[in-house]
Image: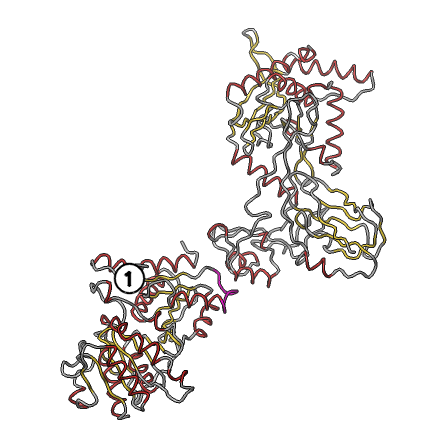
Amino acid sequence: MAILQYREALRAAMTEEMVRDDRVFLMGEEVAEYNGAYKVSEGMLEQFGPKRVIDTPISENGFCGLGVGAAMNGLRPIIEFMTFNFSFVAFDQIVNNAAKIRYMSGGQFSVPIVFRGANGAAGQLAATHNTSTESLYSTFPGLKVIAPSNPDDAKGLLKSAIRDDNPVLFMESEVMFGLKGEVSDEEDYLIPIGKARIAREGTDVTIVAHSKSYWIAMKVAERLESEGFSAEVIDPRTIRPLDMDTIVESIKKTNRCVIIDECNPYASISSEMTYRIQERAFDHLDAPIVRITAKDVPAPYAKNLIEYYMPQEEDAYQACKRVMYAK
Amino acid sequence: MAIPVEMPKMSDTMEEGVLAAWLVDEGQKISAGDVVAQVETDKATMDLEVYDDGVLLKQVIGEGDSVPIGGLIAILGKEGEDISAILASYGSGSAPAPAPVAEAPVVEEVAAAPLEVPVPAPAPAPVSGGRIKASPLAKKLAAEHGVELASLSGSGPDGRIIKRDIEAAVGGAPAPAAVSVPVAPAQPAPVAAPVASSTEASSEGAFDAIRISQMRKTIARRLAESKFTNPHFYLTADINMENAMAFRVQLNEKAAAQDLGKVSFNDLVTKACALGLRKHPWVNASWMEAEGEIRLHHDVHVAIAVAVDEGLITPVVRHADRKGLAQIGSETKDLATRARNKELQPEDWSGSTFSTSNLGMFGIDQFTAIINPPNACILAIGSIRDVPVVKNGAVVPGKQMKVTLSCDHRVVDGVAGAEFLATVRGYLEDPVTMLL
């Protein structure tokens, strides 16, 4: 097992796929000459040259459209957003073109494209640069949404995303790019899209959390363990398609569920998950499902407020105690 | 057309009834006015009459089953008639109709006030008759194990019944500290004699599970409601009973000569209270929260607590202030006998304006009683003791009896209660004054 940073795992995935398939190329702001705004693509220009690692102007709508067109014509582009906050500029290309062309062309075209980049809040970046977009994009049929929490999942899932024949939104995190973790040495390491990971087995409460929230879940589980409670932590990894089987099976065992979700709460991952859980596991629930989310306001700038805005470990801990009816 | 027979409201405090015994089999012909079953209410076992002719098509509930007021008990009709529509319309056997709220008639300021003193409709208990809160899992587990949710008290928020409550009830997982739940046997025990389930001879943690009877449920609900709602305070008086004893001997000699029954000390107390209530209308009163008024009753109806097998009941001596001691004595004896035989009818126990409870015969010197709503007061009567008393500066043998008046402070203040007790004491210490 190699210890890699999250950014290195992403780079390894892209590099391996570009070596393997010369239709794959990377395009985005600062990806080439500057080695990537967050150094994800460091050295890739040197390795693959300017035809496959392409710097773009600050024009997301333009280069996303270019990517969709390239994908329709047989290439397999990776489009990097400096952050997914900027993807809103290219909303029409993603939502109306990438997501729907396969359907509207009766299957004559497919759009094998990956949009990837940092997603969600990352400290004092203020309201317009702190959006968690996974709940928004996963509402559209035709798009797949992946949000890995660690380097190993990042590598295995990004390789699967690049090989997928449909548009995939691959959501990373500024604050996790430096995160180190063991990454499988397996040659051609692929993790299937739509398969959750049981990160920790337990019997008393199921905590479902993806991306950064996963790490809150793990801390809560440890704290609960020290008090004699056994929490099961599930990282769905893929947001759409969502692996409900794993979540439901877990809740059948624990009878309780807490969801930690960095998205704003209204019509979010957590609300969708809650619906699906009660749909399939109603008779197994011993307590209402509780979710811990970002607050229902634009992200604040002030340090104390942005910290308060984000899902809090203490809240998640208290929620677990509450659903277990533990004092 | 088939006719449903529903659980009738047989008393003011009744919320559900238990079918004690079927007297008619399915398929048997019956006529209007026939008694088809006996129903155990919170107070008594009563006959269930039908109002139509026909054939008893179905006994919807079995003996020992309970249904709320308005729940389906049986179906009458012509032989072979389809009853599925009726069964369906009542859901799974006993859909409760909304419990009719007894309307308390307003007592007009007229001499011929109705005999029945209005009893306020009991406030709906949070659980009984209302919605039972249980987690979906708890409901499923309860169904699997045949546990009746209504028999459990939930340990979750707002009394929600949760998984561990069911587990505790079925004796699986260890119950968490503070949770203790009575277990209802899957098959309710016969009504007449609640049967303890057999248990291992000396195994640790063994217990007898007694089904909570309608009467015990009512006692629990009404007395808890009274004790936790009415601000009780207590006044105790030690009454010299020497004269009363002599008076009673004299009285009973005369009664025997006239072939009348004996007068008991309790009858003397009943009479003394009744006359006292006449003089102190604020003690003969009711706090009517919903109506926003205090009622000072024109009539004096004294309820007397009688112990019966499953609990107690408080039959009423009506107009006790206007009755002679011999009549009070014979009525009290008759009510007590009928109470023990479960023969009392609702009119025998409703409408009291004051209550007494006597534990003197068990050697209890003094105790406090819980007010019997909607009364404002209850008198707890102790034994007559041989004690030294000081008379004219010398210690001499005395006969003393302690009585304790529990008062609802919302109606009766300390002075009003004390004045009433002073009157009662005056009557008992000089019984001849009761004749004035």
Depth check: give the residue in front, B408 or A55: A55
Q: Residue at x 54, y 7 (%)?
A: B393
- Pointer 1 chain: A
Position in image of residue B331 (x %, y %):
75, 26
- Magenta range is A279-286
Residue A123 to residue B288: above or below: below
| Residue A59 spot, x, y in % from top left | 21, 77
Q: Is B124 left or right of B110, judged from the image as shown?
A: left
Report the amino acid beneath label 1.
Met
Q: Is residue A206 left or right of residue B244?
A: left
Q: Quadrant of residue B42?
A: top right
As displayed, is residue A66 above or below residue B433?
below
| Residue position for label 1 | A310
Q: Nearer the viewer, residue B346 or A23?
A: A23
Secondary structure of the residue carrying tag 1 is loop
State which quarter of the image contains the N terminus of chain B: bottom right
- Magenta span: chief secondary structure: helix
Identify the residue at image location x=59%, y=20%: B281
Residue B367, placed above or below residue B205:
above
Residue at left offset 59%, top offset 41%? B220
Q: Let me know if residue B299 appears in the view.
A: yes
Number of residues whose C-alpha sits closer than 10 Å to that of mark 1, classed few (under 14), some (14–19) or many (20 or more): many
x and y percent of residue B198 in the render?
Answer: 66, 54
What colour-coding does the image apply? Answer: secondary structure
For the C terminus of chain B, which image quadrant? top right
Q: Quick check: can you spot residue A9?
A: no
On the rendered structure, is B7 left or right of A327?
right
Quarter of the image holding residue B302? top right
Picture mark count: 1
* Magenta highlight on residue A284: yes
Q: Quadrant of residue B425?
A: top right
